[in-house]
Amino acid sequence: EADIYQTPRYLVIGTGKKITLECSQTMGHDKMYWYQQDPGMELHLIHYSYGVNSTEKGDLSSESTVSRIRTEHFPLTLESARPSHTSQYLCASSDPGQGEETQYFGPGTRLLVL
Amino acid sequence: GDSVTQMEGPVTLSEEAFLTINCTYTATGYPSLFWYVQYPGEGLQLLLKATKADDKGSNKGFEATYRKETTSFHLEKGSVQVSDSAVYFCALSVSYSSASKIIFGSGTRLSIRP
């Protein structure tokens, strides 16, 4: 059973608000990821991290930012939310030390920006 | 470049029918292959994996065999149940000397009729 958590699960906010989506894992994994999942189901990697103080942009350009101050915590922030940010956001982690990239996913945050 | 192509959905079957969801891949190295499942309202969960050619991954009645000669990893189940209704993602991961990456297919939605 994977121990990766996301809060909130659902969020409805107005345009222009600043929001932070939380992601925490208790497995000690170095690598963490944020995906945006569109209604067509496809996953788009928006940010990833190899470890503390390491963050990289993913394949899909995003106006969000991330930080990795602690191994277990990888929050995603939107400074000014817009309706185009409405989506589901999935956090994941993996342990490359196992020799392959099995990813463990959180339950997701479903964001609606009005 | 590395890529994953999977069968487009939605796929609708009757209970107890035989299931195949096709997945093919392109990779420059020696990938590990995965099937993930996403149930409604949840994040992705690892369903099964195979790390080298001719390996067979299996779980919950699902099977997939790593076929290097056809670069395929098709998902099969002999008798599906209503509870198998979900979105299924094929994925590969490739490790390099200094990094690794994972690539997901676009997902296949499966609906099972009672």
Image: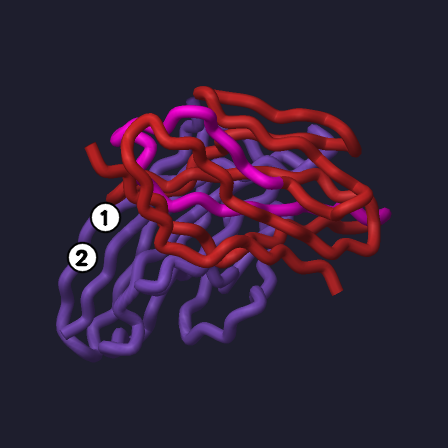
Chain colours: A purple, B red
**Badge 1 sits on which subunit?**
A
SS label for mark 2: strand
Which circle marks residue A32 in the picture? Answer: none
Do discs 2 and 1 share a chain?
yes
User: In the image, what residue type sits under mark 2?
Assistant: Leu
Residue A67 visible? The answer is no
Q: Quadrant of the C terminus of chain B?
A: top left
Tag 1 secondary structure: loop
Where's the N terminus of chain B, which quadrant? bottom right
Name which residue lies at 23% across and 47% down. Answer: A9
In this figure, which residue is indicated by the disc labeled 1? A8
Q: Is residue B92 magenta?
A: yes
Residue behind mark 2: A11
Residue B30 colored magenta?
A: no
Q: Nearer the viewer, residue B7 or B103?
A: B7
Q: Is residue A14 above or below residue B92?
A: below
Rendering coords of residue B64 (x, y %): 60, 32
Range covered by the magenta-colored residues: B74-97
